[in-house]
Image: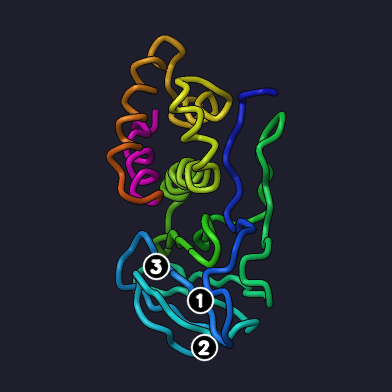
Amino acid sequence: MKTSLVAGAVVLALSGCATIISGSNQTITVNSDVPGAQVSLNGVPLGLTPLIASIKRGQEGVLSVQMPGYTPFQAPITKKINGVFFVNILSGGLFGSSTDYSTGAMYAYEPDTYFVSLAPAGMAPPMAAEWKRKENVRAFVLLNNEALAHDLAAGQGEYVDALAELLEVDQGQRAPAVKRWRASYAGSQTTVAFADRMVAELPAQR
């Protein structure tokens, strides 16, 4: 399998056990890279990020996240809230993407758990390109966390190779980089925290 991989998935829900086993309501968690963003479902405010909210099981509609100075983000919610919206999987080649990054990005990296990256409003093309570059790293880490953790523990693997390419790490520097990433993973309390650390490793745009 090729390791020339770019993370382009922006809205992906992973299948798994429901957070709430029974009852008429279910719990969703919504976080964002900009704390204090307003979360609404079908126009009804649920609260501010980081948010844990109870909604009616099977409710459909549109989840929106808004913050002054950022482009409002919206995504459809289906009856199976942890169903797939857009799917891009690790394959031999490039990740595909049909989503406009300029509106932001949402990742469902655990059942009923969402992370939203809000795009600053009115971004110039260079800024938009840099934002997308960072979101490629964040998407890859969030959506492939378990496989990446396995490869980091082994010190090698296609997911580590893909992360190295995304972070533009030369072959000769990969061994110390993997050691550093393993320590970062061990020291991160959440998947999002680890993703943030990997985004911070991205070198300045050449």
Residue at 61% in and 31% down: 5
Q: Nearer the viewer, residue 7 or 155?
A: 155
Question: Relative to 1, is 24 above or below?
Answer: below
Near mark 1 (Cα within 10 A), the count class, few <14, some 14-19 or many ≥20, is: many
Residue 187 image-quadrant placement: top left
Amino acid residing under circle 1: Ser
The earlier-in-sequence mark between 3 and 1 is 1
Decide: marks 1, 2 in contact (CB < 8 A)? yes
Amino acid residing under circle 2: Gly
**Could you say which disc has been placed on residue 43 in the image?**
2
Which residue is labeled 3 in the image?
Answer: 70
Which residues, given as a range, are shown in magenta? 192-206
Near mark 3 (Cα within 10 A), the count class, few <14, some 14-19 or many ≥20, is: some
Which residue is labeled 1 in the image?
Answer: 64
Instruction: Give the CA separation, mark 3 to mark 1.
Output: 12 Å
Amino acid residing under circle 3: Tyr
